[in-house]
Amino acid sequence: MEPEALERFTWYMREHSALTIMFHTKVAEQMGLSATDEKCLDLAIRAEGPLTAGRLAELSGLSTGAVTGVIDRLERAGYVRRVRDPHDRRKVLVEVTPAEFVKFGHLFEKAQASLVEVLDHFDADELQVIERYLKLQVETFRKRVIDT
């Protein structure tokens, strides 16, 4: 890749990252959470059912000790609860409390609308390329940066 192109893409990624962090910081503040706690809640919401603290640590890249603190804060705020694993009573799972989170869905409406506005500029073939890029970016970033 040409250095100039890499510089441009790096700038766009850094700018997108900064805007995303600022957005989630703003949302988290309105929810009474830190940005890290809000993103861990997002990971728990998108998980396929309750998950262990260890799994949340894997998904977030945080240490298990840090995740324990996150879960404690989310539980105190009413966003999650700890429940026994029905298949193994020795395990504790983290379960999202949907009623609490639903109150804040409106905070994401502008972000969703902006995504639709941007994606409306592309045809179906271009959207496939964008989706392929984003999927590969997520997978590679997680493997090379988060999971290391």
Image (cartoon, grey):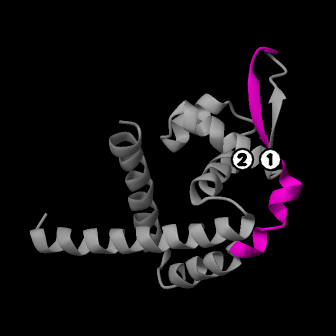
**Circle 1: element type:** helix
- Check whether the beta carbons of the residues at disc 2 and disc 1 lie within 8 A of each other: yes
Q: Which residue is mark 2?
A: 73
**Circle 2: element type:** helix
In front of the other: 12 or 130: 12
Amino acid type indicated by mark 1? Arg
Q: Give percent across and percent down for residue 141.
A: 37, 49
Q: Against 40, is 11 above or below?
A: below
Q: Which residue is mark 1?
A: 76
Within-10-Å neighbours for mark 2: few <14, some 14–19, many 20+: some
* Magenta-drawn segment: 88-107
In front of the other: 71 or 145: 71
Q: Give percent across and percent down for residue 62.
A: 50, 40
Amino acid type indicated by mark 2? Arg
Residue 139, label in figure? none
Within-10-Å neighbours for mark 1: few <14, some 14–19, many 20+: few
Q: Quadrant of residue 95?
A: top right
Which residue lies at the image location 83% right of the left edge and 63% below the top edge?
Answer: 102
Which residue lies at the image location 52% right of the left edge and 35% below the top edge?
Answer: 58
144 displayed left or right of 103: left
Q: Quadrant of residue 103?
A: bottom right
Q: Against 82, is 60 above or below?
A: below
Question: Which quadrant is the C terminus positioned in?
Answer: top left
